[in-house]
Image: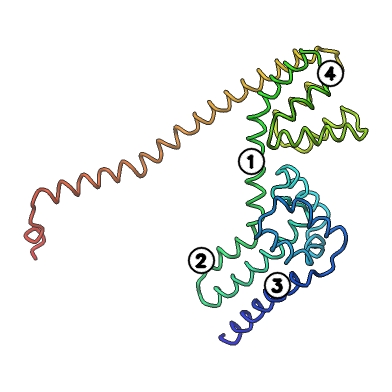
Amino acid sequence: MALLLALVMGLSVWGVFAGIRMYRADARLPSDLVLALEVGSTRTGAVDSVVDRLGMRYAPAVLRLMGPKLVAKYRRKIDLAGNPGGLTIDRYAARRAVYGFLGGVGCLVFLLRGQYVVALILLAFGAFWTEVGIWSAIRIRREVIERTLPDFLDVLAVVVSAGLGFRQAMDRVATKYEGPWADELRITLRQMDLGMSRRQAFAELRRRNDSEQVAMFVTALQQGEELGAPIVDTLVSLAKDMRRTDAQNARRKAARAVPKATMMITTFMVPGTLILLGAGLILGSGVDFGSVTGK
């Protein structure tokens, strides 16, 4: 057992030093992986950058093990998350390789030491740590976009009604906003500048965002374009519908929160309060428990 533990520790130390040596030596990588390593480098933290460089050599192997369908699934998830920290599918595979190695080695070490809970935590870390960041980024990004969109539509309607064309008005308003929605608008405008039709560019906007309000926005614009409806009226009506939907969602969340709060109060707070009051009454009564127990 001791020999096996020493062997595992030796392999883990060798892997760390090999990764550091590869990082320092600036090993040659395929051109597409080099490009992926540089994408979003200004937004990537120091730790993530080191992890990417340590695992980028093994990214192609991870992608082959995942298979085309799983790779396409995670590529869409990364798009929905807005490429947080410059994340690409290759950087994702690199992080999976590094975190999976660290989690697997740590899990094996603590299993041999009999610490099963820590081993399970490390195994979960290696398997899900990269996904946790993507899930969180998707949820936060969707909430920010849905909170920004109604105000954007109101401002856009005012600018269009002032006489600017829809394309120029959207460009003017997009420069006044920051965040994921502004980024999506700039991508859409750039696609239109490169020759993509407005309908196709907005279809790509809907594909990149898993948001009901974005889908409503794109559908309303496309239907208005087909039917010849005034764009200002469409934008104002759409903003009102989105605010009404937000209010309904807020009421539903509040309605779901009341039973949860009631359950927490009845399960924990009421028994705890009764125990505290009972213990205070007993201790303050001066009862001699020695005479009661016969000791």
Q: Amino acid at mark 1?
A: Arg
Rendered image quadrant of residue 188: top right
- Tag of residue 20: 3
Camera-nearest residue between 19 and 159? 159
Residue 197 coordinates in the image, percent (x, y):
91, 29
Camera-nearest label, 1 or 3? 3
Camera-nearest residue between 171 and 146? 171
Q: Residue at x 82, y 12 (%)?
A: 229
Camera-nearest residue between 190 and 71? 190
- Mark 1 and mark 4: span between their CA atoms? 33 Å
Residue beneath disc 2: 117
Q: Sequence order check: which comes first, mark 2 or mark 1?
A: 2
Residue beneath disc 1: 139
Camera-nearest label, 2 or 1? 1
Q: Disc 3 vs disc 2: Cβ atoms closer than 8 Å? A: no
Q: Residue at x 48, y 34 (%)?
A: 257
Residue beneath disc 4: 165
Q: Disc 2 vs disc 4: Cβ atoms closer than 8 Å? A: no
Rendered image quadrant of residue 106: bottom right
Disc 3 is placed on an element classified as: helix
Disc 1 is placed on an element classified as: helix
Q: Sequence order check: which comes first, mark 4 or mark 3?
A: 3
Q: Amino acid at mark 2?
A: Val
Q: Sequence order check: which comes first, mark 1 or mark 3?
A: 3
Residue 13 coordinates in the image, percent (x, y):
64, 78
